[in-house]
Image (spheres, rainbow, N blue to C red):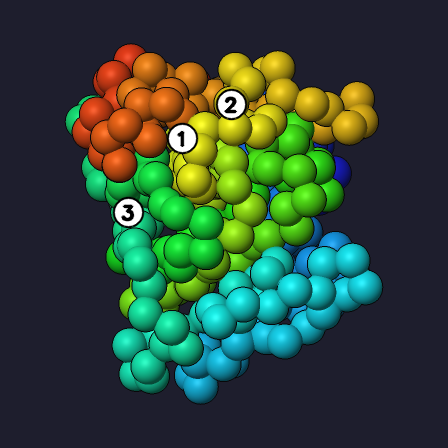
Amino acid sequence: MSENEGAANESGGQQRVSSRRRRLLAAVGTASLPAVAGCGGSSGSAAPTDTANATSTETTTETEGATTEAGDARFGYIGTDDAAPPVEPDHTVSLNIRPRENVDIPEFYFEPTGLFVEPGDTVRFDMATPHHNVNAYHPKFGYSQRVPEQTPAYSSPILGAGEYWLYTFENEGVHNIMCAPHELFGMVGSVVVGSATGPGTNPVGEAPKPTPESRPPEYTAGTVLSDPAMDPDNIVERGSVSWDDIADENKQLLLEPVEE
């Protein structure tokens, strides 16, 4: 085969990439953007990364510079079991992965998926499995407003298995959160702080959109948050909602695997 023929074959192979693959890659690429934004912060300050020493960040801004016992109001506190946390958590949420039957893509989920806490409570997010983060549905990350007004654009970095993230929920109302890399696969949750109030009580797709580009929870993220078990009043009444409480049809993948 000549050099020109080889180049032509290679070009033809590239052109045969399926449109479904392109759509999936575009969707997953969109999902990963908030993770980068969340880790960098709205002011350009970096989140804490020295997990070996389990230190918190004291980075502040003029408008969102509040700190808590568990670290920065935007970036929380990163730790490992090698060092004592600055404050004992009031609740624990595990970030998990488990296989789906007859599907290559597993389930990515928070356990519990819905949680009721009091204002000022600290939640420990345990990375039981690797490469997750905790990210608010916040306009500064390009999402519809699904956290209480005046809430900073909080996010953890993407963390490895065995690490944890502490965050103190000060602002009363519904806080919809996600793992940004796995959001479209359904890895979302809801923390109701004090009462079922605020923009997060709106049905998915009806929360405020500060810009036309701001997007609501989509694909499996949208169906999980729309499940009756995840109704904010139900979370308040029950105290917590397990991933297993959500109907199977609302956890189904709405993105198909890429075909080679």
Mark 3 — residue? 96
- At which x and y percent is residue 220? 43, 23
State how far apart marks 3 and 1 are (Cα): 12 Å
Question: Mark 1 or mark 2: which is in front?
Answer: 2
The label number, if any, that marks residue 186 in the structure image: 1
> Which residue is pictured at 27% across the width and 41% down the height?
112
- At which x and y percent is residue 48? 57, 73
Question: Visible in this render: residue 213?
Answer: no
Given the image, on which type of amino acid does mark 1 rest? Gly
- Left or right of 156 on screen, residue 248: left
The picture quadrant where one finds residue 92 is bottom left
Mark 2 — residue? 201
- At which x and y percent is residue 15? 66, 25
For label 3, the crowd category at 10 Å Cα-Cα, with few meaning under 14, some 14 to 19 and many 20 or more, is some
SS at mark 1?
loop
User: Which badge, 3 or 2, comes first in the chain's sequence?
Assistant: 3
Q: Quadrant of the C terminus?
A: top left
Given the image, on which type of amino acid does mark 2 rest? Thr
SS at mark 2?
helix
Between residue 187 and residue 206, name the one nearer to us: 206
> Which residue is pictured at 36% across the width and 68% down the height?
163
> Which residue is pictured at 24% across the width and 18% down the height?
248
SS at mark 3?
strand
